[in-house]
Amino acid sequence: MLSICKTAAFIIILLLFSCQQKEIYKDALVIKGGTIIDINNNGTSTKDLTNKAIIIKGDTIFKIVDASEIAKNQPNSIDAKGKFITPGLTDGFSVINNQNYANAFLYMGVTDVIGVESERRGAFYHDSNPSPNIHMLREVGEEKVTDKEIIATIDKHHKNGAEILLMMYKLTPNQVKLAHDYAKKLGMGTIGELGFTSYQEGMNIGVDAFVHTTRYSLDIAPDSLANKVAKQPFSNNLGSPKWRYYQLLTQLKPTDNRLLANAKNLGKSNSYIQPTFALLYLDMPFSKNPWKEKIAQIINEKNINRPADKVTGKHSYYPPKELAAYQKMAATQLRIEKVNYKHGAKYLSGSATDVWGSMPGISLHQELEVLHRIGLTNRQVLAASTSNFNDAYGFNFGEIKTGFKANILILNKNPLTDLENLKGDKMVILNGKQIDIQSFLN
């Protein structure tokens, strides 16, 4: 009799345990099965997860459990069996000018945008719905300023919701340190596009990231030329200091000691770099016609700064001398970044849309393509557009992890075998809700 009672009690315990394991998550979205691609540690970790369930409550990942723990009658669930799961992509330097731009980003899997606006890009459009999450970037140091003005400017940007501070050419080393330290105190990320401060000094200060290959290579130039570039950083005149500096870069060989020294400094630092290849992508020999992407049909050519020719996919209206200069600079950028990567540089993705023919969503994938061409593995490329943004700035997105924003791509094919699969059939989960991206084509 005692044995029968023990057996019955054991069965009851098993039943209770089973019920607990088959919990139904109310008011949640559950993604069951699939392969969660590991993009940690700058894309060097390879511990992919299978047979898991991602529990999403509101706009946040609540927890990740074994798929076997999910009840069969779990409501509001997505069966991801046989699919591949990554965080949504981030364009770390881009503009949204209108609703179609926002739609194009989402269609291409971009769920977060670090927003910039400028004279060429136009004003940032904040009223898109749906829209990628917007993390605005604001500048200080475009012109010479006092320390007091720096603090006041950062306070104003922070009060207006800016999450990233771009520190620019006219700041001295002491001012870069002042701006960086104060921005970090307020919880802001920092990017350097420096001139009167060297990039080595920026690395020593601890700037989170640097933008544009042609800018963070400025330490290669003699101080006299670097200062002239800082005074006049923007010019299409091929005789300007900027273009004289570009000409210097085009003459460098991969074994040049100046190039190697700069690459080693970047590799040893904690700062990330953002090449913005998309600015010169159309001038690269392997470039694909961006107008052939499906989503390009909703983009108005007139909204793009120096758009690609719709037939050739190339820039077709430059004066021949200017076109040749940009083509030469594009080849130089590839050579420089191959050396930077070889020496340990860590990357962030940013398309610089919509300048020089770069296009919303489409050019982020151009950026990823070229990152792979300079040597990054597909997993490292994914990290550059996802988890590295958390590592660089401390954002709570870009990872499939408890407590992080539920921005997720469910891909039909594996991006580790081909990055083109990121552009293929997929589901886009934005802040915990599935977005009907196919409707953007109607």
Image: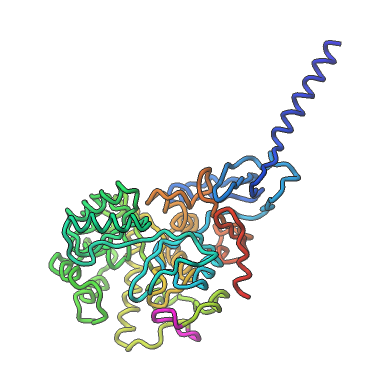
Q: Residue at x 56, y 59 (%)?
A: 415
User: Is residue 342 visible in this depiction of the protein?
Assistant: no
Question: Is residue 278 rendered magenta in the image?
Answer: no
Specify the principal SS of the magenta part: loop
Name the colouring of the figure: rainbow
Find the residue positioned furthest to the right: 1
Residue 364 versus residue 73 in the image, above or below? below
Image coords of residue 269 (percent x, y): 29, 50
Residue 64 versus residue 317 in the image, above or below? above
Image coords of residue 180 (percent x, y): 26, 52
**Where's the N terminus, which quadrant?**
top right
Residue range in magenta is 302-312
Question: Is residue 307 rendered magenta in the image?
Answer: yes
Q: In the drawing, does residue 341 fall left or right of residue 216?
A: right
Residue 103 figure quarter: bottom right
Residue closest to the eye, 170 or 37:
170
Q: In the drawing, does residue 259 fall left or right of residue 276?
A: left
Residue closest to the eye, 103 or 347:
103
Residue 78 versus residue 220 in the image, above or below? above
Image coords of residue 346 (percent x, y): 37, 54
Q: In the drawing, does residue 404 fall left or right of residue 53?
A: left
Q: Residue at x 62, y 62 (%)?
A: 426
